[in-house]
Amino acid sequence: MTAHQIRIQDLPITPVDMNSPIPLYYQVEAELRALLNSEHVSADSLLPTEHELAEAYGVGRHTIRTALSRLVNDDLIVRKAGHGTVVKSPKDRKQFSLARSFTRQMAEMGLRAHSVVLHSEIRSIQPADPHALSTKVGVDCLILDRLRLGNDEPIGLQRAFVVLERCRGLEHTDFANHSLYEVLSHQYHLVITEIIHTISATIADKYHADLLQVELHAPLLVVNTSAFLENKEIIESTVTYYRADKYEYTTVQVSP
């Protein structure tokens, strides 16, 4: 049986935003991931070619290849030599990808993203702070603690250290309703070109269990994130404790 070929003109593709702080292949991956879960794409069908996707998104084929490789590693598509890229059947569990902003991830899952700001302060970066900030010791940073929610369900508990050298006044932002990356991009014109995730596991203590509404000692995923600007300068280091009872969290390292 011949697989159904999806025509590029049948997909509601939005070209990438060259001014976004999110890397180009992250943007392509995010939209393709959403399309794979939409009515526009069915299991066992063939995606358009790399060339067609590159033209539609306004990027090079290497960017498309990188985005597709990440989806292959997440077991959402399979690339078959001589046939093309085939869409796999969706998994039963929702996948929460680290490749996109929290706000966009929630929107793609049909949930309303919002946050509760638990604590906010400005102080200098100290040697005991995350190692990724070791080159910024003594520099002012914004420490932002937020409970991240999808609709009214707690998803993650997050502490962010944001270097303030190039974004003075950031502390006046309403982070209950605004995305940090969007503010850095639109208000301060800072472009994030690399995001590194390190993932480990832990169990919930009383503090995490109460805020995330899970049982004491429930499994949690700990994600340490470092975001870098075009000049390789670090702008943010974040640690987030995610619930592991309802969602899967995936990340893929892609070779250049």
Image (cartoon, rainbow, N blue to C red):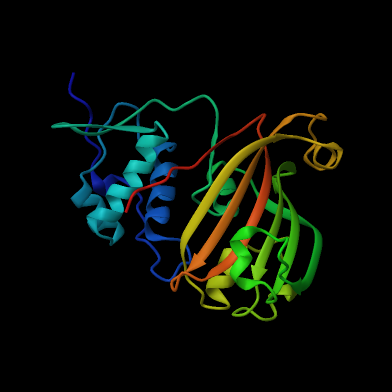
Q: Please state the horizontal and vertical placement of residue 255, each as a whole percent of the image.
A: 34, 49
Q: Image point 83% across, 30% down: which residue?
A: 216
Q: Position of residue 77 (x, y in %)?
A: 34, 33
227 or 64: nearer the eye?
227
Q: How many marks?
A: 0
Horizontal relation, residue 114 to residue 135: left or right: right
Query: In the picture, which quadrant includes the C terminus?
Result: bottom left
Note whether 23 is above or below 244 in the view shown: below
Give the residue at x 56% y 78%: 188
Q: Quadrant of residue 16?
A: bottom left
Q: Is residue 66 left or right of residue 22?
A: left
Q: Is residue 148 left or right of residue 31?
A: right
* Farthest front residue in view: 127
76 vs 65: above or below: above
Q: Residue at x 46, y 67 (%)?
A: 20
Report whether residue 186 is seen: yes
12 lies left or right of 142: left
Q: Which residue occupies the extreme left position in the image?
A: 82
Residue in front for this viewpoint, 37 or 210: 210
Would residue 173 be visible to someone looking at this image? Answer: no
Closer to the camera in the image, 107 or 88: 88
Q: Quadrant of the N terminus?
A: top left
**In the image, residue 158 lies at what x, y percent?**
71, 52
Which quadrant holds residue 184? bottom right
Q: Position of residue 185 (x, y in %)?
A: 53, 72
Q: From what the image shows, is residue 19 above or below residue 41? A: below
